[in-house]
Image (spheres, rainbow, N blue to C red):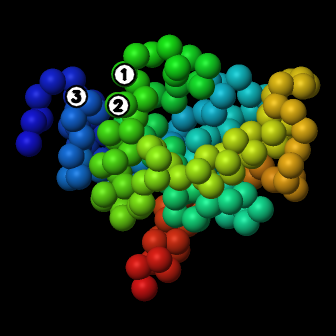
Amino acid sequence: MNKTGPRMLTFTGKLVNPLDLHQDDICIEDIAHALAYQCRYNGHTKKFYSVAEHCILLAVTDEYPGPPGMKLMHDAAEAYLPDVCCPLKNYLEGFKEIEENVMKVVSKVFGLPLFKGVINDAVKEGDSKIIYWESKALMPEHEVWGEPTKPFVELLGLTPWQAEELFLKLFSEIFEKETS
């Protein structure tokens, strides 16, 4: 196990190399905490809205496709890597591969299937559709995201600690159900 190279300290005290993650580097507490304290849309929102709350809403809203466990965990790589906005991600050579490698390790730890890369197509579809409602609630008026295709999603307005707590609770409920 390579514990050299660029390393970061996680919330639970693990010293990990995000470029060379191993299964024992990953824990749900680190993921929930990091996602709860990261603001979506590079912080260009009217109020704080965490990646964790985004994942929670996607997971609990039946109108958006995909298995709840995968919807909840679809941004888990952002616990170990920065959230890079899509327009920029395409220009960062090697970033998508690094992100996929992180998600492969996360998927092994939590028994998530991978389809066509990082997340399955249904989750990608739900993730892109929820953006309309998030942007209507959080961003200045604009026409960037197009027209809605699914019912409105009520943003909860969670503080980071509330988002972390709810993420962990939902994780337990989903994964307990899936493994029983």
Quadrant where the image shows the N terminus: top left
Q: Nearer the viewer, mark 1 or mark 3?
A: 1
Quadrant where the image shows the C terminus: bottom left
What amino acid is at disc 1? Gly
Q: Is residue 34 visible?
A: no
Residue 94: assigned label: 1
Residue 7: assigned label: 3
Label 1 residue SS: loop
Determine which residue is flagged by label 2. Answer: 98
What number of labels is visible?
3
Find residue 2 and report its horizontal and vertical position in percent.
10, 36
Q: Nearer the viewer, mark 2 or mark 3?
A: 2
Mark 2 to mark 3 CA distance (whole Å): 14 Å
Q: Is the C-beta separation of discs 1 and 3 under 8 Å?
A: no
Residue 168 versus residue 21 in the image, above or below = below
Mark 1 to mark 3 CA distance (whole Å): 18 Å
Q: Residue furthest left?
A: 1
Left or right of residue 50: residue 112: left
Find residue 91 and report its horizontal and vertical position in percent.
50, 14
Identify the residue shown where x is 71% and y is 23%.
44
